[in-house]
Image: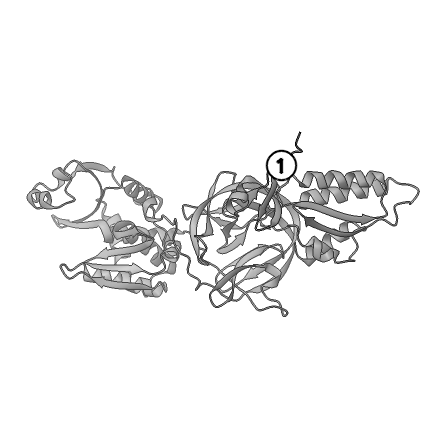
Amino acid sequence: MNKRNSRKLMKDFAFLRPQGGLTQSLMYFGFECISQESNILMSDLSFKKLEDIKIGDEVIGLCKQGTGKHYHLTSSKVLAVKRKGLRACVQITNQNNSLICTPDHKILSRVYDDCLSWREAFALKNKYVKEARPLSFPFFTTSSEFWKGWITGLMQGDGYKINHRQRIYLGIKSKDKLLLEVLRAKLEDLGIQCPKIKEKTWSQINKHGRSFFKKAKYWKPNRTIYILNIYRKNAVFEILKWMSLLPQTAAFDFLRGWLSGFVDAEGSLTQGKITIFQNEGEILEKCKQILRILELPFSDFKYKTSHLHALSCSNPFQLLLYATPVLARKKQIENMAVKQKNCFPVKIIDKGKMEVMDLTTETGNFIANGYVVHNCDDGWMDLLYKLCKEIQRVIDNTPDHSLDGFSVMQVKEKFGELAFYAGGYNSEIGELIDKAERKSRHTCEICGKRGSLSVKGGWYRTVCPYHRRTRGYMKVKPWHKGK
């Protein structure tokens, strides 16, 4: 919680007066949320509304490997989803993305040249601290132009054209049936009817060139190959028209789709790098032009023993977000390194009160609208809020005004337990404070789940088993008096 939220808590309860550093001590407890309309990046590189996410869904999170300072991508399971109602929000906007969140929500930002750290939203632009630039990734939605480009890229990668009896036929062969099923469905969505997908083996297809394929290492005569042919004249000419579009005149979504389909056809994902193989000069040049237009850095390597070229992308995660392939094996992001180049200055605008939600994941963070945001951890905030509510009830039900002098001096964590220092209270309020402090001994300070006292480097905290394991704490064994 930042100063704004601690003051909001003081406004709700008059006995929380800003004295003795109480404002600073209340900032220890979390109160962070983001808009329920935010789009969360899932593990399959699709986007899903926060309000539609359920416990058990897998999102993309960032983690550090070992003691290094660099982040890597990994899939993260959703542990909790909560609605927080109406809260005061701000909108963070840079040249690519925008996000609505509470002012205290933490966002991964670059403060110095090569250092990423968590900054609260209101502190991203603050005259008292160094300006921080949040790390952000491109955020796109698919459209009909995207799927037209995907069909074109797939056909130019794995497709073929046949001239037979003054007629032109188009077809495509692939070992992935899913690829052709998606292609057929998208063609039908665009009003192009296609026949059923055929199944054949390699030995049936390559009758005349069988001796050549037998010498190859990848020769598997019984492997199933799926074939989809397009015979209708209007459909063939429509696809040929898409193929003839120049990259300089095509729409941005069309170029993204073309690259996505081409990666599905000719791309390879190995050791966290995406490589596109091609030996046709015209197609190769078109692929290079599209990569340059999309501002995706790449390197061109030519094999000495053949005419094959390999285009390797140096920022594979950004390529996958621009051109998300259909095949699951070509969008594995596990342990993929995160580049720190996508950090831009932001503008912050007050948006008033809006419906917000919070999300808890295994990695402690997730990607919302392209920004890397921290978990909306509750910690002891609910416990503290319920305690203050009960104290206010006791004060309101005391007719002799004997509790008018009641005030809270300090609220903090001490040796893994809630410490609530107050003055001018009666025995009933004292029992409520003792009960809350006892309950804090078994409540995780980070997520609010059941926990136990743990230690790390001499610092004691009450954490749950998950955060004990992920943050390097050791459980403190209970002390028993000897017989």
Q: Quadrant of residue 315?
A: bottom left
Q: Give the labeled residue for mark 1.
A: 478
The residue at the point 16 percent across, 35 percent down is 222
Q: Nearer the viewer, residue 390 or 432?
A: 432
The residue at the point 64 percent across, 40 percent down is 443
The residue at the point 37 percent across, 65 percent down is 295
Q: Nearer the viewer, residue 263 or 181?
A: 263
The answer, for residue 249, to whether it is visible in the render is no
Residue 440 in percent (x, y) is at 68, 41
* Placement of 347 over or under 433, stated as above or below: below
Instruction: Work out which quarter of the rendered image holds the C terminus and state it.
Output: top right
| Numbered disc total | 1
In this rendering, would 301 be left or right of 420?
left
Instruction: Work out which quarter of the rendered image holds the N terminus and state it.
Output: bottom right
Label 1 CA crowd tier, 10 Å (few <14, some 14–19, many 20+): few
Q: State the SS at label 1.
A: loop
Residue 103 in percent (x, y) is at 63, 57
